[in-house]
Structure formats: C-alpha cells, structure tokens
C-alpha cells in the first residue's frame, strides 16, 4: 500500500525496529541512492541515541506519530530531507516494536502523510493478531504468564491457582515441602490450607495427564520436567546480559491478579533486578521504556540525562516526571 504511492511521489518508506535500526528501505531508486549517501539505508541506526532528532527515533521515543522537517534534524547533512513516522505496537501487549517512516521532499510531511502511515500501521497491527505458524507450534513446556486472557500452558488456558503452583515450583527446581508451598501460595494460611493445597494438586495433575512427561513429585513437591515460564526466560535473559530481550520479556502484568506471597516476591525480584540493570547500562530508549511502563520517575530522569540536549522528546519526559512526582 505504501511503497507504490511513495515511489510515485519520489519518497522512501522505511521500517525500523524498536531500537531505531532500519530493517529495510524501499521506494524510488533515485531517492534511495540519495538517501544512502547520507546513511539512510538498511542496517543504519536512526534512533535518538544515534542520530539525535529524526522521525523514526522520535516516534519510538514518544510513542506517537511525528513529523520532522529539514532543519529540525540534528545533523546538517540531512537538512534537505523531511520525514513522518508512526510507531508500531504489539497489539497484544501494547509494546512498541518498531516504526514506519516516510522520507523525502515536502510530500513526506504533507497533511495526508501521517494519516496514510497510521492506516498502514493499523493494518499491520491487525495482521499481527492473526494466528501464525509459530503460534500453532506452541512450545509444550512453556507457561505464558502474560497472556491477555489469563495464563496459558502450551497455549491452553490454565487457572490462576494452577499457574501459581507451576510458576513457584519452576522457580524452585529442588522442590518445596508442603508447609513451604502453603506459605508461598496463601496470604493467610490456616489449618485447612494444606488440605486445600492437596486438592488443588490433584486437579492440577489431572489437567497435566494428557502429557505423561509432566509429573509433579511429592515430598518435596517439585516438577519432574523442565518448564519454562515467562519469569524463568526473563531471568535467563538478564543472566546472559541481554537487556533488550529482557525488556521485551518483562511485562508489569505478570500474573497481575495473583496475590500469592511467592508470586508477589518473584514479581518484585524480577522488577528490582531489571530496574538496576537498566539504570546501570540502559540506553535512553530502554530507560524511557521501562520508566513509562513502571511509572518510575527515577528511570525517566536517567533517560533525560541520556537524551541529546536538542531532542524534542526532552520536554515530554520532563512533563512526565513532574506528573509522577506531583
């Protein structure tokens, strides 16, 4: 939809990932040659932390559609270019996963440019909601703790209590005795709690019976198979130092309805560890992403220090910090 119209208008269409790296650039050949001369080509990073003010970087930083005309760009060698860009979001989580950009002459910032980009992005986000082949091949050993319709094991719905039990045991590979598991699951355990737990485990074992490898041992209670959960994958990414993957995996809504002490503690430890990691080595975009997701003014303040002094995003971040701090 976009590329033919852009080519006719001597414009370029570019797709950037969440960090501002251009994945591809398409359009009029002459315009592409000129853009390559100023580094606007696949593989180049046009995020705010790399080139300062640009439409792709600004759209990613602010989460809104933007237009940047000639001299508003930080670098003089691109002052002859105009651009509009709109962020792309994962329709299931709301996270920004990239941006679509229109670059070239005056038509790139014409009044119809942003609505055209927004329509294209809406169509793309709609496609992301459709089942894919990857989704059809659901990992039999993955517990999704962040699905919008509740926890899912191998793509199948799971009750909150069963998800809590599996999540806690997955985080304790050596197992827990009955009293320990009761403490992890019940806010106010009483004399009936162990009996309630045994009943839940009977129902959970029945729910797992269609896969004979999924067994829960007793004395202590432990999983006899390797179960990956959203939380275990998050910890793995952090242990490997993969900050970007960790941010993609971390949603604040991990088993959001659960008040089980063990789940509350796991959520808190993950949040604190990721926050410290982002503060220590995160880019401006990563600081902004987690700061906005967590409504954390300290993270936003750290992002403000990293943003270029002439970045249009600074005023927005300052307003967000003031709103959070009252």
Image (tube, rainbow, N blue to C red):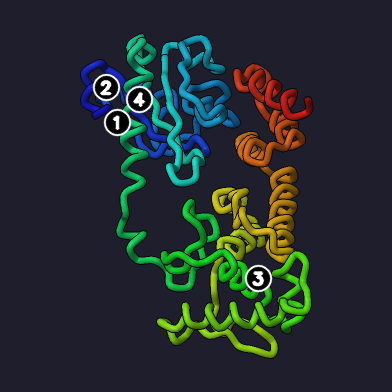
Residue 152 bears which disc, if any?
none
User: Mark 3 or 4, which is nearer the eye?
Assistant: 3
Mark 3 and mark 4: span between their CA atoms?
44 Å
Q: Are marks 2 and 1 in contact (CB under 8 Å)?
A: yes
Residue at image mark 2: 6
Q: Are marks 3 and 4 in contact (CB under 8 Å)?
A: no
Count residues near mark 4 (Cα–Cα under 10 Å), then give few for <14, some for 14-19, many for 20+. Answer: many
Label 2 to label 1: alpha-carbon separation: 9 Å
Say what secondary structure mark 1 lies in.
Answer: strand
Q: Mark 3 highlights which residue?
A: 168
Nearer to us of marks 2 and 1 is 2
* Count of numbered labels shown in the rendering: 4
Residue labelled with disc 1: 26
Q: Percent x, y for residue 202?
A: 55, 83
> Is label 1 or label 3 in front?
3
Q: Which mark is residue 117?
A: 4
Query: For this view, does 56 lie left or right of residue 273?
Result: left
Q: Circle 4 sits in a helix, a strand or a loop, which is it?
A: helix
C-alpha distance separating marks 1 and 3: 48 Å
Q: What residue is drawn where x is 54% and y is 74%?
A: 227
Res 218 → quadrant: bottom right
How packed mark 3 is, by other alpha carbons closer than 10 Å (few <14, some 14-19, many 20 or more), is many
Left or right of residue 241, residue 66 in this image:
left
Q: Earlier in the sequence, mark 4 or mark 1?
A: 1
Q: Quadrant of the C terminus?
A: top right
User: Which is more toward the observer, 143 or 121?
Assistant: 143
Q: Residue at x 65, y 78 (%)?
A: 197
- Contact flag, marks 4 and 1 (Cβ < 8 Å): no
Nearest to the observer: residue 299 or residue 92: 92
Marked residue nearer the N-terminal end (1 or 3): 1
């Amino acid at each position: 939809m976009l590329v033919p119209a852009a080519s006719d208008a001597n414009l370029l269409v570019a797709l950037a990932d969440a960090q501002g790296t251009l994945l591809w650039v398409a359009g009029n050949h002459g315009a592409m040659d000129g853009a390559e001369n100023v580094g606007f080509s696949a593989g180049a990073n046009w995020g705010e932390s790399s080139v300062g003010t640009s439409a792709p970087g600004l759209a990613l930083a602010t989460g809104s559609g933007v237009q940047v005309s000639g001299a508003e760009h930080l670098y003089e060698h691109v002052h002859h270019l105009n651009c509009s860009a709109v962020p792309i979001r994962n329709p299931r989580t709301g996270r920004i996963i990239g941006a679509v950009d229109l670059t070239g002459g005056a038509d790139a910032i014409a009044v119809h440019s942003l609505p055209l980009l927004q329509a294209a992005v809406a169509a793309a986000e709609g496609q992301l909601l459709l089942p894919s082949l990857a989704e059809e091949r659901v990992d039999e050993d993955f517990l999704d703790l962040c699905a919008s319709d509740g926890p899912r094991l191998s793509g199948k719905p799971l009750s909150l209590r069963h998800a809590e039990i599996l999540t806690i045991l997955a985080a304790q590979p050596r197992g827990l005795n009955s009293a320990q598991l009761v403490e992890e699951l019940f806010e106010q355990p009483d004399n009936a709690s162990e009996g309630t737990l045994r009943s839940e485990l009977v129902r959970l074992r029945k729910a797992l019976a269609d896969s004979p490898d999924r067994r829960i041992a007793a004395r202590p209670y432990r999983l006899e198979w390797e179960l990956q959960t959203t939380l275990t994958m998050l910890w793995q990414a952090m242990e490997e130092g993969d900050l970007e993957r960790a941010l993609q995996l971390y949603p604040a809504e991990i088993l959001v309805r659960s008040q089980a002490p063990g789940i509350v503690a796991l959520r808190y430890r993950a949040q604190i560890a990721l926050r410290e990691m982002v503060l220590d080595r995160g880019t401006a975009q990563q600081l902004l992403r987690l700061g906005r997701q967590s409504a954390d003014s300290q993270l936003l303040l750290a992002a403000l220090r990293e943003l270029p002094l002439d970045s249009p995003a600074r005023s927005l971040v300052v307003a967000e910090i003031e709103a959070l701090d009252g």
